[in-house]
Image (spheres, helix red, strand yellow):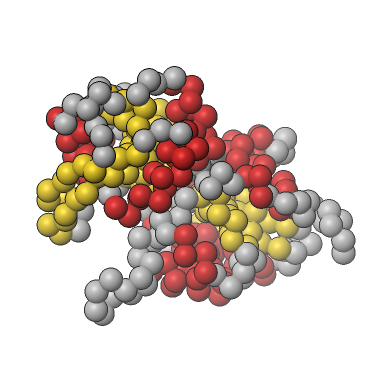
């Protein structure tokens, strides 16, 4: 069987259907038909409602909150493999457990490696994902990983703002590499916020390294969970004389009171992608959020992978 002698089909798990539909539309195709049977005890069983024999099957699912969505993806991969799919490719815009990429203290798991093993055991042939929390997670997989960056979306948006005295900031030391790439491409100064944590998800003190006064600052990050770090960083920068503070972040986890923290903070605008759907609770203020879609980016990579074309031009850094 040579390139393109087989068909490709795109399916979605339940919680990423909104994004899968946009990806399918960008590819001028329809989502494949599937269903999930839910039993009274909470157990569920996905099923394909059309043949996938000999097809390259793309299954779209972000793992938020991680456990149930991940297991549904694993079951879908297993079902496709048992239905004689030619290749099974998991499209995981948000890869959960990515923050568990190392043993940073004794007697803890490395969750990202375990998830990689589970995907391999289920029969996955390839993974597509966006902005992994740590680049080295790609090495946890024993099959190809297409690591897509949302930077092309964010850089175009930032340029469109036409801000004078622009600076790029990292909310912590760990994000310095990402911030440096943005500042280099935009040819603007960089600021690093240094924080100390009292415990997980709780920020202690914070200070800034770099010139802040009189600057329009854009904070760049990959994940916003509780929004404690990024809002504290923004308020600190404003206290130090910043003219305005915006933030860009790929994965809007926004757990707990995160949206409220953003609403009450000095952040002028928070730009995120749709790897995770925005909360639609009417009591939640999301007026500061701007959502950019990664659908066309993933559609482009899916088409190139299917046609055995290079995807190098997808990457900004």
Q: List x then y, in percent, for residue 232.
A: 18, 39
Question: Could you say where residue 179 lies in the image, as x and y percent from the top left?
Answer: 39, 44
Q: Residue at x 42, y 59 (%)?
A: 134
Pick the front one: 177 or 102:
177
Count numbered badges in the picture.
0
Q: Is residue 198 above or below residue 294?
A: below
Q: Quadrant of residue 229?
A: top left
Describe residue 42's horizontal placement relative to residue 74 as left or right.
left
Which of 263 and 149 lies nearest the eye of the viewer?
Answer: 149
**Residue 145 placement, left or right of 6:** left
Using the image as rendered, state which of residue 283 and residue 304 is in the foreground. Answer: 304
Image quadrant where one finds the N terminus: bottom right
Q: Residue at x 12, y 48 (%)?
A: 205
- Horizontal side of 170 relative to 117 (left or right) equals left
Q: Residue furthest bottom?
A: 107
Residue 109 visible within the image: yes
Please provide percent x and percent y for residue 210.
26, 39
The answer to which image quadrant residue 141 occupies is bottom right
- Asked if residue 202 shows in the view, the reply is no
How far across and down, in percent of the image, does residue 51 sit?
74, 56
Q: Nearer the viewer, residue 282 or 120?
A: 120
Above or below for 268 versus 53: above
Residue in the picture at 28% in, 44% down: 192
Left or right for 197, reference 120: left
């Amino acid at each position: 069987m040579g390139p393109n002698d087989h068909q490709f089909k795109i399916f979605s798990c339940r919680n990423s259907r909104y994004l899968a539909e946009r990806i399918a539309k960008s590819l001028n195709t329809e989502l494949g038909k599937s269903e999930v049977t839910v039993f009274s005890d909470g157990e569920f069983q996905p099923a394909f409602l059309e043949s996938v024999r000999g097809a390259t099957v793309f299954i779209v699912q972000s793992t938020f909150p991680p456990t149930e969505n991940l297991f549904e993806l694993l079951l879908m991969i297993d079902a496709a493999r048992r239905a004689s799919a030619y290749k099974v490719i998991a499209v995981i815009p948000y890869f959960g457990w990515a923050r568990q990429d190392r043993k940073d203290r004794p007697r803890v798991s490395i969750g990202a490696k375990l998830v990689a093993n589970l995907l391999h055991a289920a029969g996955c042939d390839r993974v597509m994902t966006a902005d992994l929390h740590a680049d080295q997670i790609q090495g946890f997989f024993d099959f190809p990983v297409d690591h897509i960056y949302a930077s092309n979306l964010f850089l175009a948006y930032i340029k469109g703002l036409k801000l004078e005295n622009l600076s790029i900031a990292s909310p912590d030391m760990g994000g310095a590499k990402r911030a440096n790439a943005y500042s280099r491409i935009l040819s603007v100064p960089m600021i690093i916020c240094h924080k100390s944590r009292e415990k997980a998800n709780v920020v202690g003190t914070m200070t800034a390294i770099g010139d802040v006064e009189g600057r329009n600052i854009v904070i760049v990050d990959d994940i916003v969970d509780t929004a404690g770090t990024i809002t504290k960083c923004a308020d600190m920068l404003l206290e130090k004389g910043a003219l305005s503070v915006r933030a860009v972040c790929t994965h809007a986890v926004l757990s707990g009171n995160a949206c409220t923290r953003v609403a009450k903070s000095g952040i002028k605008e928070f730009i995120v992608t749709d790897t995770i759907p925005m909360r639609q609770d009417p009591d939640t203020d999301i007026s500061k959020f701007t959502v950019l879609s990664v659908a066309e980016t993933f559609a482009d990579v899916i088409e190139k992978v299917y046609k055995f074309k290079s995807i190098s031009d997808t990457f900004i850094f």
